[in-house]
Amino acid sequence: MSRLKLLTITGMRKRMFVGFLSIILLLFFSGMVSLFELGRVSNDTEEILLASKSNVELAGEMISALNEQNDAMICMSVIGDSSESYRDACKRSIERLANAVRLADGRVDDNSAVDSLVMRSNILNAMVTDYLDGNLMLTDEYSSQDWYVDSYKDEYLNVASHITSYMTGAQSTLGPEVNRLSRTAYRAVTPVFISLVVMLVVVLMFYYFLSVYYIRPILRMNKSLGDYLTFKVPFDVGITLRDELVELKERIMALVSRMQ
Amino acid sequence: MVLVFIAAFMLASAGVSLVNNTDSAYYPLLLSSFLTALLGVFPLIFVPRAEQIKTKEGYCIVVGSWLVACIVGMFPYLTWGGEFSPMNAWFESVSGFTTTGASILNDVEDLPRGLLFWRMSTAWIGGIGVVMFALVILPSMGKNKLLLSNVELSTIAKDNYKYRTQVILRILIFVYVGLTLVTTLLLKLAGMCWFDAATHAMSACSTCGFGTKNASVAFFDSVSVEVILIAAMTLAGIHFGLLYATIIGRRNNIFRSEVVRVYLCMMLVISIVIAMSLWSDDVYSSFPESLRRSVFHVVSVTTTSGFAIADTNTWTSLAVILLISCSTICACAGSTSGGMKVDRLLLSGKMIRNRLKLQQHPNAVIRTKVDGIVQDDSVLNTVVIFVVAYIMLILIGTIVNTMFGQDLMTGFSASVACTSNVGPGFGGVGSMNNYSDFPSVLKFNGALLMLLGRLEIFGFIQLFFIRYWK
């Protein structure tokens, strides 16, 4: 019981202070939780966007390298122009593709699309290297054009489709991250909503208590004092809350009795 | 003050969350704790302490406490999100505080530990009764408590064992906390981790049946765990005053109680009959295996816990109807279990016997006694009225459930399970299913039945009679 008495607040000023402090704390606390959760939302969003951007950039690099290689191969094997610039372009594209695939492989832990992309790109690069080194058995019946159409083109399309698979696969691995983001976003919004409801209840309670325990007694005292001064009706007001209002009432009563 | 206690439990759950690497439930629980505490403390700033409260106010406090507890109990669920829509959060919160144990969660294991602990806390707080906390804390002791306990404890419980209300409070807390601690320790020794042991002990002693695993107790597949839970549930289903009397060596102990004898015999006989039925129908390969499952489920259902170690939907029709009967009768008055109570069954049986005797001997004066105490006519009338109201409530619940598309078995067993605060039923709400597929209106209906059942129907209804308040 004594512990409960500690919770009992007396005094008009204290009551008002604690009442408003409660509302301020409510706003502050819910705001802080929302702020914290919003911070997490921001971090998660940034992570997802960066991962997504990096995936798209890598895929773009692979496609660009592949296209450069294809252009050079068409010029060399189909058109028959074996100038050094095409050979350099081929070598450069092999390196670019290998680097991009290596980066993609290092970034994703468990993605079958990347594994098959690594395998297919290695096969393609090996084919091109063999062509550049002159290791292919090209004859009049089986020319470089035939090799391009029968072997290279298929492998080129294969790698291109694997790059597409990698891109969609890499995006789908972001699914759990997106789910986490949506949960965090929910947690950032709900506290504010619940706090608003609670605050509405608290404000209504505050209004009710102020009305019942302060405004109504003051109005009654005012009316009763007016009645006494006008009609000499005895001053009598019932007040339940034990604070300055009771003192005020007692002082008015003392004043009234002194006047009498 | 009820809200302040609930806030303290939310804070404790946030502590659990903090210990578990500040899981995702930490901030929701912390915020909910603050909001609940604020709602609880705010009125204390202004409202003067009442010296004496009236019966009507007592009713209002008790029923209001349950409702408010259920509302603030939603906060952590709503703030955390996941499967908790507003209606799901309300259902889960009511289910916890009324110690029903019915759930809408498809994946319990997805919940962070802090939230799981809060879920168990609602059951534990509900077990002893939200009002019990209010009574301990409410500064105005004396007559107030008696008024309040009229709503909380059934009339039979008070009439059979006339303790002073203050002693009842001590008994409840002493036996309840003691039983929970002992069960926790035993479950830990049986191989559970501390978290699972504590949460299952809380759930068993409050006869709630919430678990931390999707497969309930079947997950542990341990005979020792099942035996400990059976013992804890059985004890939690006995009048707490009797348990206290037994511990301190009083004469009116559990070994001399007629009600407890009926309660234990009923569970034993039904368990054996179900085991034989399961064995003869080859549901389980051996009789001991059938007995293990039947005993666990009979105790779980009779005490209104709702733990499961098997899918009872695959059981025989005889087993199903017997389990539904257990769900309706339930355990003893003065315990944390819900339902009709064995005391009322015993009294009804004696009234039927007396009625037959009166037909044979019209001038005879026959009195109805329980444990050697003559029962007043008013008590007997209350029993009859309650039984009728209880059956009507189940029927209305079934009608509503079937009206919204549930099959008869699901609708009826869900109605029984919610009204008796058991939790799992049969069909779509079987021991290995949940209420997630129910439409919102049925979830609301289920929550209402739980509240009506917990407050023994009339306590809740009375609040809504406008004339009563004039």
Image: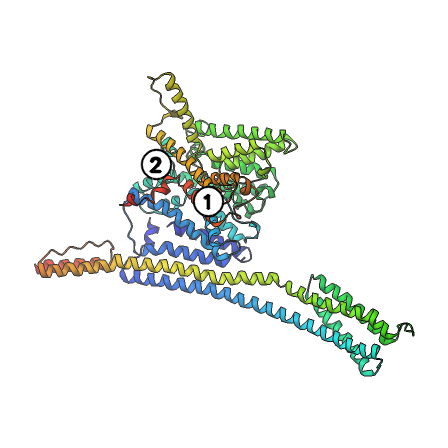
Q: Position of residue B313 (x, y in %)?
A: 58, 38
Residue holding disc 1 = B446
Q: Is residue B91 left or right of residue B289?
A: left
- In this orientation, which residue lies closer to the viewer: B429 or A23? B429
Chain for mark 1? B
Question: How many circles with numbers are drawn on the protein?
Answer: 2
Within the image, what quadrant is residue B294 found in?
top right
Q: Amino acid at mark 1?
A: Gly
Q: Is residue B187 left or right of residue A97?
A: left
Residue holding disc 2 = B164
Sequence-first disc among 1 and 2: 2
- Find numbered disc 1 in the image and state the secondary structure of the residue it sits on: helix
- Find numbered disc 2 in the image and state the secondary structure of the residue it sits on: loop
Q: Could you give the CA–CA distance between mark 1 and mark 2, rounded to whole angstroms?
A: 35 Å
Furthest residue to the right? A140
Residue at x 28%, y 63% (from the top left corner) = A13
Residue at x 72%, y 65% (from the top left corner) = A114
**Where's the C terminus of chain A, which quadrant?**
bottom left
Circle 1 Cα neighbour tier, 10 Å, few/some/many (<14 / 14–19 / ≥20): many
B170 in relation to B73, above or below: above
Within the image, what quadrant is residue B168 found in?
top left
Residue at x 55%, y 63% (from the top left corner) = A181
- The disc at residue B402 is none
Marks 1 and 2 share the same chain = yes
Q: Position of residue B395 (x, y in %)?
A: 44, 37
Q: Is residue A220 left or right of residue B341?
A: left
Chain for mark 2? B
Circle 2 Cα neighbour tier, 10 Å, few/some/many (<14 / 14–19 / ≥20): few
In the rendered image, is residue B67 in sight? yes
Q: Position of residue A87 (x, y in %)?
A: 82, 80
Front of the two marks 1 and 2: 1
